[in-house]
Amino acid sequence: MARKGTKFNRYFLEVKSEAIRLYLEEGMGYVAVAQRLGLRSKTHVETWVKRHLEGKGFQDERLRAPVKPDEQ
């Protein structure tokens, strides 16, 4: 669980795609890619590359399903 006051960043698809490209095509490491793109952590790059290689999308899975009007 995140600490109170933690800021969660959401990155545009272009940033994620560039990170994957730099890692796979340019042969840069996770840390180097994160530093070049100004990311807080190499973990973002690791996750994006893994999801890309598994053929998964970049949909944020933390989001909850919308609440139906009759459930409110």
Image (cartoon, rainbow, N blue to C red):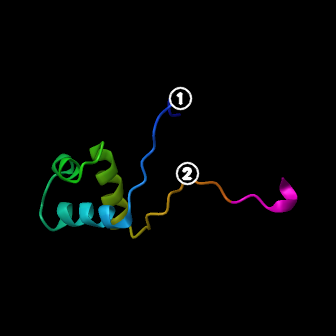
Q: Nearer the viewer, residue 34 or 5?
A: 5
Name the residue that disc number 2 marks: 62
Residue for point 83% across, 61% down: 69
Front position among marks 1 and 2: 1
Residue for point 30% across, 52% down: 46
> In the figure, residue 18 lies in which quadrant?
bottom left
Q: Amino acid at mark 1?
A: Lys
Q: Which residues are magenta?
A: 66-72
Residue 4: which disc? 1
> In the figure, residue 64 lies in which quadrant?
bottom right
Residue for point 39% across, 70% down: 55
Question: Residue 47: where, in percent of width, then height?
Answer: 35, 53
Number of on-image labels = 2
Tag 1, which secondary structure?
loop
Q: Which residue of the protein is positioned furthest toward the right in this rendering?
A: 70
Tag 2, which secondary structure?
loop
Question: Residue 62: where, in percent of width, then height?
Answer: 55, 51
Q: Amino acid at mark 2?
A: Arg
Left or right: residue 15 versus residue 6 is left
